[in-house]
Each structure stands twice: as structure tokens, then as C-alpha cells.
Image: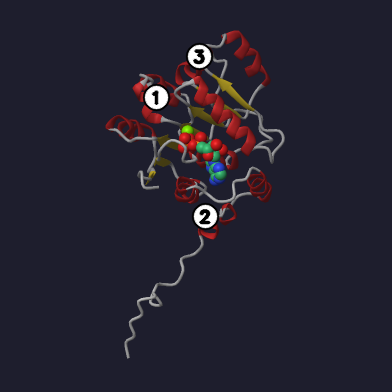
Amino acid sequence: MTRTDPSGSAAPAAPTPASEATAFDRLPLPPAMLANLRQLGYLSMTPIQAESLPLTLGGHDLIAQAKTGSGKTAAFSLPLLTNLNPRRFAVQALVLCPTRELADQVTQEIRRLARAEDNIKTLTLCGGVPIRTQLASLAHGAHIVVGTPGRILDHLQRETLSLEALNTLVLDEADRMLDMGFAEDIAQVVAHCPKQRQTLLFSATYPDGVAALAGRFMRDPKSVTLTERH
Ligand code: ADP
Ligand code: MG
């Protein structure tokens, strides 16, 4: 016998609550990092984080496209931090950003996310700041460098920055970096990076130029695209 019930008793079982499906503790992250995320009020992953972190924490290169404000910084900072050896005091991660303001924001977010490890040093290197000031900071060393392509390249050419120990390269806001004419600087910075590394490219849009950039520097990248409805 078939019953039809306009009140909706034939509705499918309730989906898994979002809070479970997107809980950070589903991820292979150290307990101290998970505790820190809870303290920061990061209770569940944003869509770009939920889609990308299983791939990036598994070591894949990634091309991720999602709009501004979707949580891309944590999406690349968590894999970057898990790749890091805090006892090795050398630059192991580089994040390239289009502007000083964005680089400062990324540095702040990385510092918050890295709080569980109290001795990780993150340094910002951008144009518009006297080189001399940066040389003093570089002399003290860092695990993570965040900066704009031109100034990073300047330090590489002066040999005041070495990327020999790098294991993670992030291109943040790749579309904006190309718009600002950084393609050649980025190419030269990448030439200073070890071939064996994880490369993560984040962008709000994915024009042909970004695809071409990805094709030059990435190894079998996975792609995650989140459209406006997210
Ligand atoms: P995007 O780089 O995509 O523009 P951001 O990484 O700057 O976005 O993140 C936007 C805001 O969301 C920031 O204030 C960040 O601290 C916050 N945020 C990121 N991920 C989470 C999360 N999982 N839970 C709560 N807030 C988050
Ligand atoms: Mg961002």
C-alpha cells in the first residue's frame, strides 16, 4: 500500500549536520592545533576549507578558487604549518601576496593559527619598507616568510634570503598579482625554490593567465572551485 502524506513524512532522512561534516577535528591535525582553532572560534570549516584541506593535508598541490572572505588564508596556512619543522630554523614556507596590506593580514592570521607552537617565527617582506630594516629582521631568521614578489626577489638576488629549505610555496590572490604585473617576478622567485615542494595557488577568479601560471609551476594539481552560491 502506498501512502501519500502531504505533511512530508516521505522526506529523506535528515542530512548530517553541517557542524559534524565540517568539524575541523575530522582532519589529521595535531591536537594542540585543533584546540587552538576552537579557542579562535573556528568551530567548523568554511566550504573552501572543507573542500581543500583533505587534499592539501594529503600533500597535493592545489589550485583553489573562492571569493574574498571565504577563509582562504586558513585553507593554505594549516597545510603550511603542518609541513613545518619548528626545530629547523630556516625558511620552510613562502607566501606571495599582491600588496603589503594583504601580506600583513596573512602574517597576522598565520601567527594566530601557529599559536599552538610557541616558537614559530613569521616575517613579512614587502616593498615600500627600507631594505635595511628587513636585513636586520632577516638576520634573526624565520620559519615562514610572507611578502610581495618584487621585494622577495630582491632579497633572493642579494642573497639575503635563501629558500633552500622551503617545502611549501603559496601564491595568494594569484589573479591580483598577475593584474599588478608580477608574473615575471613570480617566475624568478619560483626558480629559487626547491623542485620538491608543495605549491598552493589561491585566487578569487580564474582567468587564463592564472591557469597558465599554474601550469608552469605546479605538479599534478588538484582543483577546487567554489562559485557564488557558496
Ligand atoms: P579570504 O582570504 O578568502 O578573503 P580570509 O582568510 O581573510 O578570507 O577569512 C575571512 C575571515 O574569516 C577572517 O576574519 C578569518 O579569521 C575568518 N575565518 C576563516 N576561517 C574561519 C572558520 N573556519 N571559522 C570562523 N572564521 C573563520
Ligand atoms: Mg585572502
Mark 2 C-beta to ligand 1 under 8 Å: no
Horizontally, residue 47 falls left or right of residue 132, namely left
Q: Circle 3 is placed at which residue position?
A: 127
Q: Quadrant of the N terminus?
A: bottom left
Residue 132 lies in what quarter of the image?
top right
Q: Earlier in the sequence, mark 2 or mark 3?
A: 2
Distance between the alpha carbons at the discs numbered 3 and 1? 14 Å
State how far apart marks 2 and 3 are (Cα). Answer: 38 Å
Number of residues whose C-alpha sits closer than 10 Å to that of mark 2, classed few (under 14), some (14–19) or many (20 or more): some
> Which mark, residue 39?
none
- The residue where tag 2 is placed is 22
Mark 2 to mark 1 CA distance (whole Å):
31 Å
Q: Quarter-wise, where is residue 91 in the image?
A: top right
> Is residue 213 something that shows in the picture?
yes
Q: Amino acid at mark 3?
A: Gly
Which residue matches tag 1? 177
